[in-house]
Image (spheres, rainbow, N blue to C red):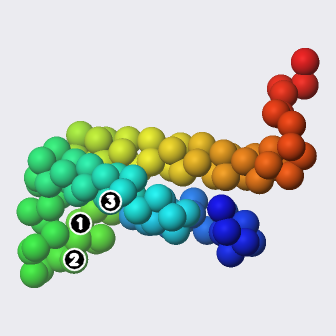
Amino acid sequence: MSDGELSRPIWPAYPLSAFVAGLGHCYLGEWKRGASWFGLYVLSLAFLSARTLSGAFAVSEPFFVTALQFDSVSYLDVAVPLAVLIVCLLDVYLIGLTKRTDPLAAVSGEPRSNGS
């Protein structure tokens, strides 16, 4: 890891991933993993929430207005894309933990224990 990566804060990766799956991974330098998460998110939107996407291209109502109307969007339309975002956030969190603890183990020169 370079000094630039050590000084970069990890916390911006979380809201980036919540905004679009994969952006947080790209921020952390995990480009392939970020592209994979983004692709999975787009596929989940395309194949598992077709009604929500079809409403995105309607000229009469913008996508966000349609998505916020609970009577026009069913739970199944958003369940899988939301699950992909949640698992993506968990993955970013775990990557952040490893990036946070790896420099500590390298500095001390000895393996880190769990305190037992």
The answer to whether the residues at label 1 and label 2 have Cβ atoms under 8 Å apart is: yes
Q: Looking at the image, tell me whether mark 3 or mark 2 is earlier in sequence order.
A: 3
Give x and y (percent) for residue 66: 23, 66
Residue 71 appears anywhere in the view: no
Q: Which residue is the site of mark 3?
A: 35
Task: From this view, report whether residue 74 is shown above or below residue 27.
Answer: above
Query: Is residue 48 or residue 27 the one in the foreground?
Result: 27
Q: Secondary structure at mark 3?
A: helix
Q: Which residue is mark 1?
A: 66
Would you identify the image quadrant in which residue 115 lies?
A: top right
Mark 3 near mark 2, Cβ–Cβ under 8 Å? Answer: no
> How much space separates mark 1 and mark 2, taking CA atoms?
6 Å
Quadrant of res 46: bottom left
* Three-letter amino acid code of the residue under disc 3: Ala
Question: Residue shown at 84%/28% (left/top)?
Answer: 113
- Relative to 18, 78 lies left or right: left
Is the residue 84 above or below the residue 41 in the image? above
Look at 10% across and 81% down and name the residue there.
59
The crowding category of the residue bearing disc 1, from other C-alpha atoms within 10 Å (few below 14, some 14 to 19, many at least 20), is: some
Whole-angstrom CA distance, mark 3 to mark 2, is 27 Å
Instruction: Identify which amino acid the numbered label 1 is placed on.
Output: Thr
Place of residue 68 in the rendered image (x, y in percent of width and height, measured from the top left): 33, 62
Image quarter of the C terminus: top right
Which disc is residue 62 wearing? 2
CA gap, disc 3 and disc 1: 27 Å
Q: Is residue 4 visible?
A: yes
